[in-house]
Image (cartoon, rainbow, N blue to C red):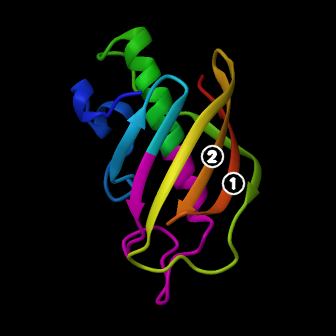
């Protein structure tokens, strides 16, 4: 695994997202099967309320982390100028916290490709706050 900065890539090289929908702040590790990112819960996030953010937003955060890994794989297999098409994302399973996510909380997200069938991938994601896993999400990604 390598740090993104060591690879000469930026977040915009890997994801089709742009502000204000970019939730990932920092890519800690990435290779063709695993990505680990860090983010801070912010008032600018989707589903923000006065006291915090609805935990459903963790699905988007997990999908973006999965996109980092699969974007890295795309660049390594098809080249840096390859089409940055996004994935259609289905949620196969999700265990989310019931309480709002507090502003300023730092979240660590890990996404791992468990199955790769060409244009279809199944990705298992965990979201941690400090040393506690607060969410587990299994995504199915399809790229046309």
Instruction: Tell me the residue at 69%/51% (across/down).
Output: 137
In the rendered image, residue 43 lying in the magenta stretch gets the answer: yes
Q: Of 1 and 138, which appears nearest the observer?
A: 1
Residue drawn at the location 42% of the way across and 79% of the way down: 103
Residue lying farthest top? 78
Numbered range of the magenta stretch: 37-64
Please check the rendered image and state whether residue 93 is part of the magenta-colored stretch, yes or no: no
- Residue 76 in the image, given as x and y percentages of width and height: 39, 14
Q: Is residue 50 above or below residue 32?
A: below
| Mark 1 lies on residue | 136
Can residue 85 be spotted in the picture? no
Q: Which residue is mark 2?
A: 125
**Is the residue under label 2 in contact with that under label 1 (CB below 8 Å)?**
yes
**SS at mark 2?**
strand
When asked about the image quadrant of residue 33, the answer is top right
Q: Position of residue 9 (x, y in %)?
A: 25, 29
Compute the Cα span from label 1 to label 2: 6 Å
Image check: 11 left or right of 92? left
Residue 23 pos. (x, y %) = 40, 56
């Amino acid at each position: 695994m390598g740090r993104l900065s060591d690879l000469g890539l930026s977040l915009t090289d890997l994801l089709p997202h742009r502000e204000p929908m970019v939730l990932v702040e920092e890519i800690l590790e990435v290779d063709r099967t695993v990505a680990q990112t860090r983010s801070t819960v912010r008032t600018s996030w989707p589903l923000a309320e006065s006291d915090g953010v609805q935990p459903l937003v963790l699905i988007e955060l997990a999908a973006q982390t999965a996109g980092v890994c699969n974007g890295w794989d795309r660049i390594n297999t098809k080249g840096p100028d390859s089409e940055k098409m996004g994935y259609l994302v289905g949620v196969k399973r999700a265990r989310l916290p019931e309480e709002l996510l507090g502003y300023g909380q730092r979240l660590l997200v890990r996404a791992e490709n468990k199955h790769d069938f060409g244009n279809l991938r199944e990705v298992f994601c965990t979201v941690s706050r400090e040393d506690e896993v607060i969410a587990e999400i299994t995504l199915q990604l399809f790229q046309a």
